[in-house]
Image (spheres, rainbow, N blue to C red):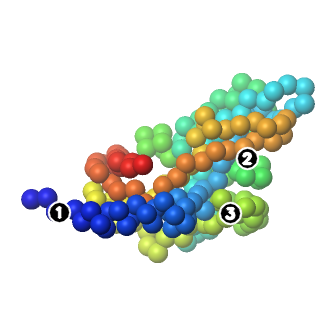
Amino acid sequence: MATPVDSAAVEHAKTLAAGPLGEKMAKQPLLFAKAAFFGEPPSKERKTKVNNGTVTLLDLGGGPLAVTCAHVLSQYRAVKKKTGNALFQIGSVVLDPDAQLVGESTDIDLAVLKLTEAQIKEITSSGEIGSCVFKPASWPPSELKADEFVAFGGFPGQWREQIGAAELEFGSFSSGGCKVSSVSAEKFSCQLER
């Protein structure tokens, strides 16, 4: 039997989501995320092709980590092999992701990089986005269930804009509270309500 919906509560929630609370909730996931980008180093002689991905800044008790997708590193390696000179950067920090790789799985499309204290300080020092490192109260988290809520955010490549020879702008997308509609061993799904 379905639970009755309180239409007044739904309308009140929509009003809150459309105001300052909704804006704060939408930005919350991006506090722990930064754009990572890679490609040929910038040049005034030619337009540089740049790719990007998202890293989540995380500390599970052993120091700062940058978590991204394995396909991001795979694409970086392909550019490096093709050009012989590839740049990988998180925020304003240039690094060699292979030298700092902790683990990688193409099966679950996940890669984890160990960051130094100096790197994380520099990464989190510019602006509100990517200004925090997520430190969960316990790890691993409890198993996700349908009807629970998740927060997520990132920097879609199609929203990347090259403003100048050495200047990029990354558009972002995030949700501070999205209800999980289904869960399986490999993925979960959410229904986005506008």
Report the amino acid beneath label 3.
Glu
Q: Quadrant of residue 11?
A: bottom left
Residue 26, given in percent of the width and then of the height, sits at 52, 59
Q: How far is mark 3 from mark 1, CA to CA?
A: 40 Å
| Front in this rendered view, residue 41 or 82 | 41
Q: Which residue is mark 3?
A: 128
- Does the residue at mark 2 contact the one at mark 3 (Cβ under 8 Å)? no
In this view, which residue lies farthest toward the right? 44
Q: Are marks 3 and 1 in contact (CB under 8 Å)?
A: no
Q: Quadrant of the N terminus?
A: bottom left
Q: Is residue 77 above or below residue 125?
A: above
Name the residue that disc number 1 marks: 4
Q: Residue at x 65, y 29 (%)?
A: 78
Relative to 122, does residue 78 appear above or below in the rendering? above
In-front residue for pair 38/62:
38
Residue 87 located left or right of residue 142: right
Write the residue at 45% across / 66% down. Answer: 16
Q: Element type at marker 1?
A: loop
Q: 20 or 137, which lies in front?
A: 20
- The picture places residue 4, in percent across and down from the top left corner, at 17, 63
Q: Is residue 120 visible?
A: no
Badge 1, how many Cα within 10 Å: few under 14, some, many 20+?
Answer: few
Query: Closer to the camera: disc 2 or disc 3?
Result: 3
The vertical placement of 174 against 70, above or below, is below
Q: Which residue is mark 2?
A: 89
Mark whose residue sits in front, 1 or 2:
1
Q: Earlier in the sequence, mark 3 or mark 1?
A: 1
Left or right: 82 as drawn, with respect to 63: right
Q: Which mark is residue 68?
A: none
